[in-house]
Amino acid sequence: MRTTLTATAAALVGLASAQLQGGIYTKYPDCVNGPALLTTNLVCNPNASPHDRAVAIINAMTITEKLENLLDVANGSARLGLPPYEFWSEALHGVAGSPGANFNKNGTFSYATSFPMPITFSAAFDDDLVEEIATVISTEARAYSNAGRFGLNAFTPNINPYKDPRWGRGSETPGEDPLRISGYVKRLLIGLEGTDAGLFNTSHSGYKKMIATCKHFSGYDIPGMSLGH
């Protein structure tokens, strides 16, 4: 099952994970059987724009509800039919163990493919390969999400140029060259979010397999580190 960009943009306002025995299981707002405050809200109209849908559900929140959903573990809103949601999921080189991922100890959903670190497969200078790897990652992420074991977003990719070897997270990046980084990131995003996402093509059908989050803008960024932040 795929989710539209509009549904995802709206879902990221509140979204979903309920703590059950054995780990975090993700569920999403129900625009059919949910409370009237949700089903009659513009957020449930797939024909509205992502911006308008997100604004509508945010406007329906109280100040307290807004504050409670600014955290890594968003509380959602029972009043609005928005379940809690864990935003922290990782997929730099595969679906990875993180607060937003739930792996079984053995059997089904006990593992996911682990690819080399980004600086390694970026060094292949093969962007077709980058997209193929990202496609596998997003397919596995969607499978875990469909089973309630992963969210619809991941804190991936790390696009900081690796300029200073003293920075301990260089292996997460595609390297130091802006041209190499741009090619890598473009094809990685296509693989992660899907070719139907309308981001780098003309179809604009709006469907995304998952939401990629380019990082870091402030925390752990190299420019900030060099300035002593």
Image (cartoon, rainbow, N blue to C red):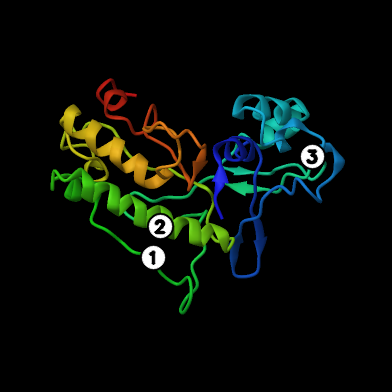
Location of residue 217 with respect to 96 vertically, above or below: above
Please, which residue is most extreme toward the top here?
A: 227
Within 10 Å of the Cα at label 1, are there few (<14), some (14-19), or many (20+) other Cα atoms?
A: some
In front here: 87 or 128? 128
User: At 42% from the left edge and 57% from the top edge, which residue is drawn?
Assistant: 139
Q: Of discs 2 and 3, which sits in the foreground?
A: 3
Q: Quadrant of the C terminus?
A: top left
Location of residue 163 with respect to 104 vertically, above or below: above
Position of residue 4 measured from the top left corner of the image (x, y, whole percent)? 57, 41
Q: Of discs 3 and 1, which sits in the foreground?
A: 3
Q: Earlier in the sequence, mark 3 or mark 1?
A: 3
Position of residue 144 measured from the top left corner of the image (x, y, whole percent)? 50, 61
- Disc 2, disc 1: CB below 8 Å? yes
Q: List the residue tagged with mark 3.
A: 38
> Spatial distance from mark 2 to mark 1, Cα to Cα?
6 Å
Within 10 Å of the Cα at label 3, are there few (<14), some (14-19), or many (20+) other Cα atoms?
A: many
Within 10 Å of the Cα at label 2, are there few (<14), some (14-19), or many (20+) other Cα atoms?
A: many
User: At 17% from the left edge and 34% from the top edge, which residue is drawn?
Assistant: 180
Q: List the residue tagged with mark 2.
A: 95
70 vs 150, left or right, is right
27 vs 227, left or right, is right
Residue type of the residue flagged with mark 2: Val
Q: Quadrant of the N terminus?
A: bottom right
Q: Earlier in the sequence, mark 2 or mark 1?
A: 2
Q: List the residue tagged with mark 1.
A: 112
Location of residue 47 with respect to 124 vertically, above or below: above
Residue type of the residue flagged with mark 3: Leu
* Helix, strand or loop at mark 1: loop
In front here: 79 or 205? 205
* Helix, strand or loop at mark 3: helix
Residue type of the residue flagged with mark 1: Ala
Position of residue 45 measured from the top left corner of the image (x, y, whole percent)? 71, 35
